[in-house]
Image (tube, helix red, strand yellow):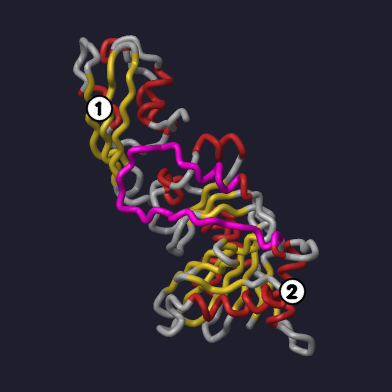
Amino acid sequence: MIYIDNEGITDPHINLAIEEHCIRHLPAGEDYLLFYINAPSIIIGRNQNTLEEIHQSYIDEHGIHVVRRISGGGAVYHDHGNLNFSFLTDFSKDKLNNFKQFAAPIIKVLNALDVPAEMKGRNDIVVGDKKISGNAQFSSTKRMFNHGTLLLDCDLSQVAKALDVKMTKITSKGHKSARARVANIAEFLEDPLSTDAFKEKILASLFPEGTERKTYHLSADDWTSINTLVDEKYRQWDWNYGRSPDFDIQRTRHFTAGIIDFRLKVKRGGIIENVKIYGDFFGQRPISEIEDALTGIRYDKLEIENALKTIDLYPYVGDVNRNEFIDLIYGEDKT
C-alpha cells in the first residue's frame, strides 16, 4: 500500500478533486491510502438533492462549504475534528459493498485505543448505538475507492444546525439522508488525541515498524489535472447544486394581498422547467408573465432575483414585498 500525501490541504473542493484524480489516473495494480481533513463543509452524496439536505442560510452565514462527491450515500458534515480516509484499489466484485473489509484496519486501531467500535448495518462504524463513522464507495470498471469519516472531535452542534433542513415541500427522486445518532470518538478515549496523532496511529498500524512506508507525492502534472477538476467541477454550482435529480416544489404563503401558491418543476441540471402560480390575490396583468420570466433559469436565488429585478410585482400580485416574494420561491421556513 502507498500513502498519498495531500500536503495538509483542508479545502474540500481540492481534497475531493485529489481523490477523483487519483482513482482515475494513478497506476493500476497498486493500493493507495489517502487521508484528508476538511474545513467546515457539507459533503453531499452523488445522488442527492442538495436543497433537501442543508440549512442554506445557516451555511451561508457561517461560511460552510457545500460540495458534492462522486460516491453515493448521505450528506455528512466535516470539520477539522473529522478525519477522512480513502482506500483506493483495483476493482473486484468481492470488494464491492464490502465495507467491513475496508473498515477492518480502522476498527483494529480503535479497539487498540479501548474504543469498542464495530461495523454495524451496511456501512457504519458504531460504538453502542452511536455512529462514529460512515462509509461510501465509488467504482469504475477498473478501479474503486472506499472512503469514510472518522468523527474524532467534531463540533456536533454544527452538524445538527447545518443539516437542519428549512426548505420544505420538496419532492424529488434523490436519495434522502437518514439521520443517525452520532458521537465523537474522543468521548470514548481515556486521553485526548489530536486528529494528526490519530492519523499517525492508523498509519503505524498499516505500516508497522520495520515496514517501508511508501509515500506518493503529487507531481506538477497531477496538480494540473487536480486544479482543472476543482475549477471545472468541484467549485461549480452545476455540480454541487444543479446535479441534483429532478424535483418538484410547492410553496405557499399568506400575504396581506392574498395567498400565493408556487408550483415549480426543476429538472436535472437545476433548471426550472415549469412554473405555475396560484392564489386568491388580485392582479391586473396575467400571472403567466411572471411564470415565463422564471421558466428556463437556474433554481438559484441570485438567478431568480435577476429574472425579476426589472418587473414591478404590484400589477401581478398586489402589494407584496419583493424580498418576501423571492423568499417564497427560494427561501427557508421561519421556525
Q: Earlier in the sequence, mark 1 or mark 2?
A: 2
Quadrant for the N terminus, please.
bottom right
Q: What residue type is disc 1 on?
A: Glu
Determine crowd level at label 2: few under 14, some 14-19, many 20+ residues with C-alpha closer than 10 A: some
**Residue at 59% across, 34% down:** 61
Task: Please tell me whether mark 1 sits on a helix, a strand or a loop.
Answer: helix
* Direction bottom: furthest residue: 210
Q: Is residue 276 above or below residue 221?
A: above
Can residue 233 be seen in this snapshot? no
**Residue at 42% across, 43% down:** 51
Tell me where residue 34 appears, x and y as whole percent: 62, 70
Residue at image mark 1? 291
Does 170 lie within the magenta span?
A: yes
> Which region of the structure is painted magenta?
158-187
Q: What residue type is disc 2 on?
A: Lys
Task: Please tell me whether mark 2 sits on a helix, a strand or a loop.
Answer: helix
21, 316: nearer the viewer? 316
Q: Is residue 135 above or below residue 234?
A: below
Determine crowd level at label 1: few under 14, some 14-19, many 20+ residues with C-alpha closer than 10 A: some
Could you tell whether 4 is left or right of 121 in the image?
right
Image mark for residue 201: 2
Q: How many marks?
A: 2
* Direction front: furthest residue: 128
